[in-house]
Amino acid sequence: MTPGQNGSRVPGDRVLRSRGVRAQDKRRHTSRVPSGRVERLARLGVMAGEFALGGIAEGARRVLASDASEGSVFLSGAYAEKLADRLAHMRGAAMKLGQLLSLEGEDFLPPEFADALAILRDSADSMPATQVRRVLGREYGKGWQQRFREFDFEPIASASIGQVHRAVALDGRELALKIQYPGVARSIDSDIDNLASLLRLSQILPVELDIRGLVAEAKRQLREEADYLAEARNMRRFAKLLADDDALLVPAVHEDLSTRRVLAMDRSRALPIEELRSPDCKQDLRDAIGARLVDLMHRELFEFRFVQTDPNFANYLFEPDSGRLVLLDFGSVIEFPKDFVVRYARICRAMRQGDVQEAQRMAVEIGYLSGQEPPERAQALAELVVLVGEPLRSQGPYDFGASDLAARARSSGMDLAFRQGFLRAPPPETIFLHRKLGGTFLLCSRIRARVDAGGLVEPHLARILGEDA
């Protein structure tokens, strides 16, 4: 979520002069966030009922039409769009699990279903102004308005856990306030359990696929994301780790206006990273920003062992004049032990060298394979691992914008899952790392960057594997 953009006012904004508070733009899609556990359970129950009735009707239609199509009647783009729409209204952990499935599910969901769920990565309804007022009153107390010279009720961004608003403190500090949706924190476990059950019963997920590890890791990570004081600590830690890099900026946290459910930080006036897609943007700038993204990913994993695992497009801004990259949203982070990082360096070395046999051995050590699979399945999985390492093998800059690697990897994953019957969820500790790796690839692809990924990772691999030797 971004507290930045370019600082311009939203067309149609009005200013409430009496308090310096901007009114809500009525054209923006808003909906009240269901905040109580019972209410959220009821919403999921209604969703399940809608799917059940729709499934019965679709099943009857198929019988009458003598449609011999195989698979769940729910595995269609129309049902995925309906599910995505309901989750976007729910927000919170239910929406977050949908986001994770849109990424991790690409190998065991039909493409049209995964594509429909992908809209959850970038969109959510926003809270109405009345609900925002109640949240701020609960966090800051009565008379919260007196803390601000200005407060804009029109959010800059809305996501699964909360939304961001512009504000100006009484002393003139320009702020971005990240405000958590009510009820999100206390409904994490029930949301995820109930949605996982719904996906099982409707056969949207293959019944033989074990997602217990994914569910447990999603709960753990979401509990951390819901604690904004923990996110503030993460921001300060990353700012310290990156203090020697003038090309990267982490906004400062304002502790006097931050609580567990409200995070106050500097407001950046940088531009969304997607502005780099403009035809007017020079290729050199795209390449430079892409190189920073890839290098940052490698530093986080191999140097810091502390990874921000939500590379959403909205979480990166850039300053046109300086070319500096502004980093946002540190709620989703994971810290890896050294032994895991060493194992991952070894599998990256195998990817870089195109060594399928070593990739297979390391896939067992990391947990992608159990070691009990038939040889042909283990070989196919290792070949897929080597395939996704294609950018690391490129001699010189890899053209992310021209690459069809994502489509080839998806096709191979679907073939492995459905033709060869290999359905194995990834190790829980890799779930959010995959989100980082895949998201960084998509970022570089979106801005059409050309990056020497192999050259950037090589010093890290040499250092880590040399130390371990």
Image (tube, helix red, strand yellow):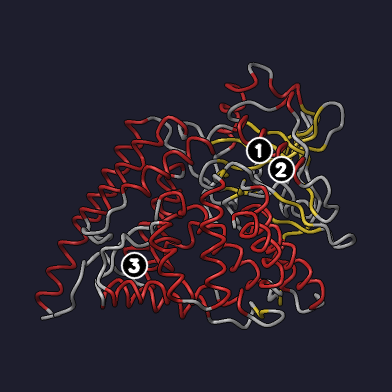
Question: What amino acid is labelled 2 in the image?
Answer: Phe
Q: Residue at x 68, y 67 (%)?
A: 458
Counting from the top left corner in percent of width and height, residue 127 is at 54, 40
- In the rendered view, tell whether residue 390 sits above or below residue 366: below
Question: What amino acid is labelled 3 in the image?
Answer: Leu
- Circle 2 crowding by C-alpha within 10 Å: few under 14, some 14–19, many from 20: many
The residue to which callout 1 is attached is 234
Q: CA distance from mark 2 to mark 3?
A: 35 Å
**What residue occupies the far front of the structure in this picture?**
469
* Label located before the other in sequence (2 or 3): 3
Residue 84 makes an appearance in the image: no
Q: CA distance from mark 2 to mark 1?
A: 6 Å
Q: Which element is circle 2 on?
A: helix
Counting from the top left corner in percent of width and height, residue 368 is at 38, 61
- In the rendered view, tell whether residue 368 sits above or below residue 421: above
Mark sitting on residue 238? 2
